[in-house]
Image (cartoon, rainbow, N blue to C red):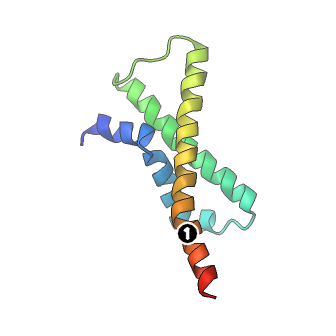
Amino acid sequence: MDLRDALMWLLSGGGAGLAAWYIMERVAFLKNIEELEWKRVAAYAIASSIGILAYLLLVTMLYEAAPATWREWVEKLFNVASIAIISSQLKHGFTNLRNKRTLDLTN
């Protein structure tokens, strides 16, 4: 895997979402946010930031063509952020919520 492959995985392979989920589970102050809505906002922001940063690196390294207009930039960054957020929520749902349901059933 080279740099382009790694950035593409972060961008479109669910890597940004997986990285955000991992960060949310491992960084104590993020994991311990008590208000669930703020925790969700933090997860969205982290996932979006990772995805957007990966895209900007792809453009900077000339692996991807830069969008020509400001509208194309907005559309592309929105798409990148959406993919990252959805993949982080899928990982959370498949891992954390499944484990919680299993624990609830055993009690």
Q: Amino acid at mark 1?
A: Arg
Picture coordinates of residue 104, whole percent (x, y): 64, 80
Picture coordinates of residue 67, whole percent (x, y): 49, 16
Furthest toward the top, the residue is: 68
Q: Is residue 67 visible?
A: yes
* Image quarter hosting the C terminus: bottom right
Furthest toward the left, the residue is: 1
Q: Residue at x 52, y 53 (%)?
A: 20
Picture coordinates of residue 72, whole percent (x, y): 56, 17
Would you say 54 lies left or right of 46 here?
left
* Image quarter hosting the N terminus: top left
* Residue closest to the eye, 69 or 79: 79
Question: Which element carries disc 1, helix, strand or loop?
Answer: helix
Q: Residue at x 51, y 35 (%)?
A: 52
Q: Residue at x 54, y 25 (%)?
A: 76
Quarter of the image where one finds residue 77: top right
Q: Residue at x 53, y 43 (%)?
A: 84
Q: Is residue 107 above or below residue 83?
A: below
* Residue closest to the eye, 25 or 107: 107
Q: Is residue 27 visible?
A: no
For the image, the number of numbered tags is 1
Mark 1, Cα crowd under 10 Å, few <14 / some 14-19 / many 20+, is few
Picture coordinates of residue 64, whole percent (x, y): 38, 22
* Residue closest to the eye, 87 or 62: 87
Would you say 19 lies left or right of 70 here?
left
Q: Is residue 76 above or below residue 38?
A: above
Furthest toward the front, the residue is: 105
Q: Is residue 51 above or below residue 106?
A: above
In this figure, which residue is indicated by the disc labeled 1? 98
